[in-house]
Image: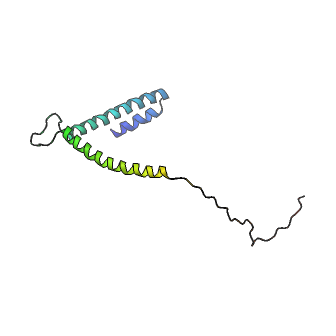
Amino acid sequence: MLQKIQNFFLKLREKDEPAKKRWLFALSSVSMALVIMLWGTYVNLTFQNLDAAPEDIAGPGFLKTFNSGFYAVSEKSAGKLSILFDYLKKIAKQKNSITIHSADINFILNDLENLSPKKLP
């Protein structure tokens, strides 16, 4: 079996470019379909049936849970936003000032030896 596959690919190497491209397209399509089928099988095995709701689980509905979560998040966000706005107001009320100091830079190096000028030819 392995020898047949090796012979197939050796024969495919000697064919012209359009034939190679057709085989590339066909084999890529088959491998992609195989991967999608395996993925679909995996999804079907891992997820439960969503139509049948278990009856032993009792709890609040989606909207009640969503509303309580929304209110909790909005309260925390409102507190953080008020702190942020207070900080931004404080920054906006500040006045800008720029102080420029003269630089004390000395470009003369004391430890350098003197170079004598030379005439170019």
* Res. 87 in view: yes
Counting from the top left corner in percent of width and height, residue 26 is at 38, 29
Q: Residue at x 48, y 32 (%)?
A: 14
Task: Please determine whether, in this image, residue 25 is positioned above or below residue 96.
Answer: above
Q: Residue at x 30, y 49 (%)?
A: 76
Left or right, 44 with reference to 121: left
Q: Residue at x 23, y 41 (%)?
A: 67
Quadrant showing the N terminus? top left
Counting from the top left corner in percent of width and height, residue 114 is at 81, 70
Task: Please determine whether, in this image, residue 115 is positioned above or below residue 33.
Answer: below
Counting from the top left corner in percent of width and height, residue 113 is at 79, 71
Quarter of the image where one finds residue 27: top left
**Residue nearest the viewer, comparing 106 with 29:** 106
Quadrant showing the C terminus? bottom right
**Which residue is farthest left?**
56
Total numbered circles? 0
Left or right, 121 with reference to 37: right
Quarter of the image where one finds residue 97: bottom right
Which colour style is shown?
Answer: rainbow
Counting from the top left corner in percent of width and height, residue 15 is at 47, 30
**Residue nearest the viewer, comparing 116 with 23:** 116
* Res. 16 in view: no
Left or right, 107 with reference to 118: left
Q: Residue at x 48, y 49 (%)?
A: 92
Left or right, 24 with reference to 67: right
